[in-house]
Image (cartoon, rainbow, N blue to C red):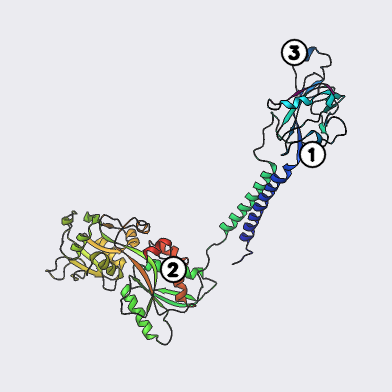
Amino acid sequence: MEWLSAENVVAVGTAVLGIAASAGMVWYERRVPRRKRVGYRVQMDNPIGDDVRSGRVNRRLGLFLEAPGMEDATLVLLRIENDGSQGIDRDDYTSPERHGLTAVFTDRTIRGVSVTQPTDTDHLMDHFTAERGFGYEGNALRIPRVPLNRGDHFKLLVLLSGGDVGRGIRLIGGIREGEVHPNRSATPDDKPPLFSRASRLITLMLTVCVMILAGIVVARDDSPPPVGCEQGTLTVTGSTAFAPALREAAQEYEGDCEGDCEGADIAVGVHGSTAGIRELAAAGSAAKGKGAPAVVAFSDGPKPGDMPELRETRVALSVFALVADDDVGVRNLSTADVRRLYQGEIGDWARLGGRKLPVHLVSRDANSGTRQVFQRRVLGRGEMANSSVDCVHKDYPSAPVTRCELDSTDQVLAKVAELPGAVGYSELNLALRAKGVRVLGLDGDAPSVDAIEHGRSAYPYREIEYAYTYGSPPADSLASSFLTYLSRGNGQSVIRTHGHVPCWTPEGMKLCA
């Protein structure tokens, strides 16, 4: 694994940044606010007189108009609060004077002060007396040593003259093991920010990192090569029903390994499950003493019991289906009806509720694994004897129905589509793609890979797809690598796209057991 790849660096950086930001916020919440803090803010600074340069027009009535010295008057509302996490006592103020803090109004003269407090803090007002230093002179307002519990506040409404709105207002003084500071709380006329500046910065940085990581993941080729790409030649034979998946998997393997093993050459030539197993056995016998032959045979169902030298790998669960000509007028058959059909007991579809059409049985040859699965899973016995070469005419008049045998699944589907009254069998995915044929249900269950995979169907016409090798191929051989690709690598995706359930998925392991 390339630990220093770009996506890993960004991912680790994003994680570290997130952890650091979280730790920093925890530290800030637990450490910084533990200091004693007196915050102040100007909640109002409004003109009353006509001569105040504020840029705003005023209208006055009553005392605001009649009292002397109101031409350049202003009103300031100053809020003072304990915005730390500890209470503040009288002794916590560090001023050498009797009072604790001093509010200075630049270029203005104080004319009067009114103190207000919340209804639940009546004790605060007792401290605003002359004996405790409360008073003003010029532009300085002396504020007593007011003890403040956490979250307590009071407000000072100050009448001023001789200056302009917006001139500096400062609170001077100190707090032992703490600070006096202007806070950034919003005034009534301000719109509070949704997030703090620090939160916005952290969010922006994390968003940028995530977007960079996503871009790298999307842009790069995330398809790993098959496990252990190997060189050499390999012949894949056997099941015609599984052939489309095998052909695509071979192409994908060669493409994924391009650059790693330019010499990989996989040839897919299928002629039926039984024929493939015989070909493998013959190749193994011819190669005795020379190692395992480079041949893999795929079979719809297990091998014959008299071939102990063949080693199996369970690759997928395949689902098969009965298919009929579109015109027969039947959509579902019972297992009993199917058995009667294939024993020649029913010669016309009208006896099964369909249209009046003669039955034509289109079967596979004896090498077919699809036929063997059909006989094993549905019929419970072999089919009746072959009675036609062209699938249309009986070779002898005494035959109860017309029955022919063809070499491949594609031939069966094509013949059923063109022959009125025909019925045959096929791998499900190939049947669903074929034109002119209808897929039939069995005992009320429609053939469905999804329903079977998730345990919602007892549909019987299905079988495990086996891969056979002659003995155990060497670990560094192309045969071993290709089987690993199919069973545990990217080949599983190819198998699924062709309508099979890979045996090594959680659901497939139960079905292939």
Is 279 positioned to the left or the right of 335 in the image?
A: right
What is the x, y in percent for residue 182?
A: 77, 35
Main secondary structure type of the part rendered in magenta: strand
Dot 3 or dot 2: first in sequence order is: 3
Q: Is residue 58 above or below residue 348?
A: above
Range shown magenta: 109-118
Pointer 1: what residue? Answer: 179
The residue lying at 60 percent from left, 58 percent from top is 216
* Along the line of sight, the residue nearer the viewer: 277 or 13: 13
Dot 1 or dot 2: first in sequence order is: 1
The three-letter code of the residue at mark 3 reads: Leu
* Mark 3 surroundings: few (<14), some (14-19) or many (≥20) residues within 10 A: few
* Mark 1 surroundings: few (<14), some (14-19) or many (≥20) residues within 10 A: some
The residue lying at 82 percent from left, 17 percent from top is 71
The three-letter code of the residue at mark 1 reads: Glu
The three-letter code of the residue at mark 2 reads: Ser
Dot 3 or dot 1: first in sequence order is: 3
Pointer 3: what residue? Answer: 61
Can residue 35 be spotted in the picture? yes
What is the x, y in percent for residue 175?
A: 81, 37
Secondary structure beneath disc 2?
A: helix
